[in-house]
Image (spheres, grey):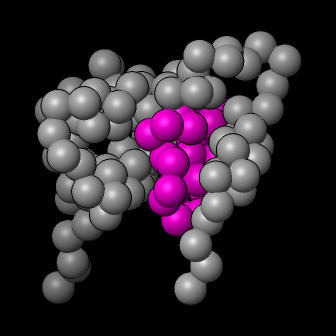
Amino acid sequence: MHIKTKTETNTNTKQIINDDDSDPLSERKIENATDGLNHDCFNCLEKVASNNKDSVIVIGNYIMSMKAETNLSDNYRRCIIILLSKLSLFFKNQKTFKSIAREDILKFLDSFSQVS
């Protein structure tokens, strides 16, 4: 098992948002939200960031809010990042989280159901 160091985490975050129009504040929020997590979180965010940086920023803000309000475990934080990334990817990064309706969530949840 490989444990990420602070340097590796910073490097991975810069790879996720490595753009001329990148916002240092947004990068810092995402870095803080994913600090100390396994590489699978970075992979999820990279896939989302490739087409929809706004969704990555929303995920980062949400995680930071949750950390401030509760004692958020690393595993729960990891699960939230992966789930929200999958939700964004389910809609091919074309829908913002604000525009997702109840019916959209039901379609997403149905995608996990087993076919008999």
Of residue 107 and residue 31, the one placed in the foreground of this image is 31
> In this image, 36 relative to 78: left or right?
right
Q: Nearer the viewer, residue 87 or 6?
A: 6
Q: Going 21% across and 78% down the picture, which residue do you hit? A: 114
Identify whether 50 is placed above or below 112.
above
Residue occupying the far front of the picture: 6
21 left or right, relative to 30: right
Q: Can you say whether 65 is above or below 110 in the image?
A: above
Q: At 49% across and 37% down in the image, what residue appears?
A: 32
Residue most extreme to the right: 20
Q: Residue at x 26, y 57 (%)?
A: 73
* Residue 10 percent coordinates (x, y): 69, 44
**Can residue 38 be found in the magenta stretch?**
yes
Q: In the image, which residues are magenta?
A: 30-52
- Can residue 83 be seen at all in this image of the molecule? no
For the stretch drawn in magenta, the main secondary structure is helix
Please state the horizontal and vertical placement of residue 115, each as a whole percent of the image. 22, 79
Q: Residue at x 62, y 36 (%)?
A: 49
